[in-house]
Image (cartoon, rainbow, N blue to C red):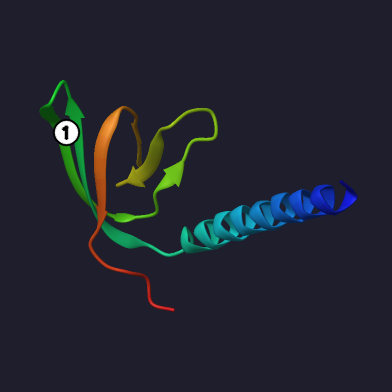
Amino acid sequence: MKKNSLIILTLFTLCGCQRSCMKFEKSMDKNSERDYNLVVFNGGDTVFVDNFKGVVNESKEDNSIYYFKDGELIEISGDYILRSKDLPKK
């Protein structure tokens, strides 16, 4: 029983570390600007399209994103497709 508990605890620890590492890598990636194409849908219809160069941030409260374009804050929630046109140079 102790051996099984140790194995389960080890697995939870490793999974938690992997998630933390992925989150850290993603947060570091936010420091570089990319070219994006954004398409927002409502009921299957396209309601908003934007092409911009910038940094996309995720909201901590819900499943939305936001970014700045020409000094304006743009917040998106709901159904959307966000495509990165290029990868940051490492």
Secondary structure beneath dot 1 equals: strand
Provide the residue designation for mark 1: 48
51 and 85: which is toward the camera: 85
Q: Position of residue 51 (x, y in %)?
A: 19, 50
Residue 50: quadrant of the picture: top left
52 and 37: which is toward the camera: 37
Report if residue 68 is visible in the image: yes
Q: Which residue appears at 23% of the width and 62% of the height? A: 85
Drawn side of residue 37 relative to residue 89, left or right = left
Report the residue that reaches farthest toward the front.
1
Vertical comparison of 13 with 77: above or below? below
Residue 53: quadrant of the picture: bottom left
Report the residue that reaches farthest toward the left.
45
Q: Which residue appears at 59% of the width and 58% of the height? A: 24
| Residue kind at label 1, given as amino acid type | Phe
Report the residue that reaches farthest toward the bottom.
90
80 and 34: which is toward the camera: 80
24 and 5: which is toward the camera: 5
Report if residue 71 is visible in the image: no
Q: Position of residue 6 (x, y in %)?
A: 83, 53
Q: Position of residue 71 (x, y in %)?
A: 35, 44
Q: Position of residue 7 (x, y in %)?
A: 77, 55
